[in-house]
Amino acid sequence: MTSRTGFSVATLNLDHVVKLHHSEPFRTAYGQQTHVSADGRPIVWLSYCAGRNVELVTGSDLVEPMMRLCAEMSVPIALLGSTNAVLETVAKTVTKRYPGLTIATTIAPPMGFDPDAAQADTLLGDLARSGARVCFLALGAPKQEILAARGLKACPQMGFLSVGASLDFIAGTQTRAPRIVRAVGMEWAWRLLCNPRRLAARYGACLLILPRLLARALHTRRTNAHRDPVKHSGPS
């Protein structure tokens, strides 16, 4: 942030992987992100099966540490997405929680907002003029990642974090799984039980793609082992 270089953070989960298989615009937008974290235990486990150790860093785990850092560094932020009521509650909560934090603007796009349409240019123009340096996007996938990719071009000195339902967690309009549930990798089950009608089909698609992803991960591990047998043979 001190270098005034823009960035964008996407948080990869199985739902995103499913969407990446079916949406070219989403794949393009993901390819333009500067950082991608593992937002779910399955991504961590699949990475391990592929021979790579990655750390679980969810969007919700990023939000408040980033806000704390922005407060300490006097970096103004923007809240974009959800509803006006949620954003107002979040703004009041986090400015009280992190003294010195400046909310440059809050923007709740209208229902049916299209990040590829002309209205997105207007929104990004308002965002650039607000003076914000970091923008928290709570539009859900793929809208937030597509808008972040456009934002990198329109606002090259701004950082974008795609954080999904994280602002609703802060506002209390949605409840995140308890810490112990998250620790054992069952946050997905908690969310499914809380909202089965909305999430059943989504999680069903995630389960269907898992065997293919596991096979690909194991193939990657074997391929890399053949390329560098010394590195993968373990201690002698």
Image (cartoon, grey):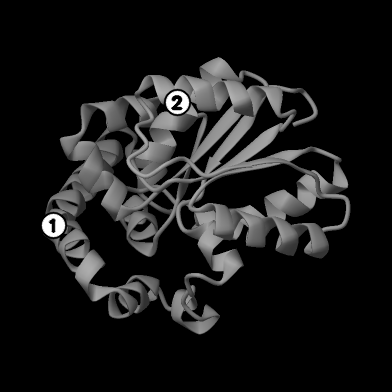
Please indicate whether residue 102 sits to the left or right of residue 85 in the image.
Answer: right
Residue 120 shows which numbered tag? 2
Q: Kindly identify the residue that appears in the image at 59 percent across and 29 percent down.
A: 7
Disc 1 marks which residue? 211
> Distance between the Cα atoms at labels 2 and 1?
37 Å
Please indicate whether residue 109 sits to the left or right of residue 135 in the image.
Answer: left
* Nearest to viewer (mark 2 / mark 1): 2
Q: Look at the picture and state if 146 lies above or below 74.
A: above
In front: 136, or 230? 136
What kind of element bears circle 1? helix
Tag 1 or tag 2, which sits nearer the N-term? 2
The x and y percentages for residue 3 are: 77, 23
The x and y percentages for residue 99 are: 87, 57
Query: Which amino acid, by three-letter code, is at mark 1?
Result: Pro
Please indicate whether residue 89 sits to the left or right of residue 224 in the image.
Answer: right
**Could one spot residue 57 in this view of the protein?**
no
Q: How many labels does the image show?
A: 2
**Could one spot residue 95 in this view of the protein?**
yes
Q: Look at the picture and state if 150 lies above or below 227.
A: above
Q: Kindly identify the residue that appears in the image at 13 percent across and 50 percent down.
A: 212
Q: Kindly identify the residue that appears in the image at 32 percent across and 60 percent down.
A: 42
Q: Look at the picture and state if 128 lies above or below 70.
A: above
The x and y percentages for residue 1 are: 74, 31
What kind of element bears circle 2? helix
In front: 120, or 160? 120
Residue 124 shows which numbered tag? none
Query: Which amino acid, by three-letter code, is at mark 2?
Result: Ala
Query: For mark 1, does the 10 Å Cα neighbourhood hold few (<14), some (14 to 19), or many (20 or more) residues?
Result: few
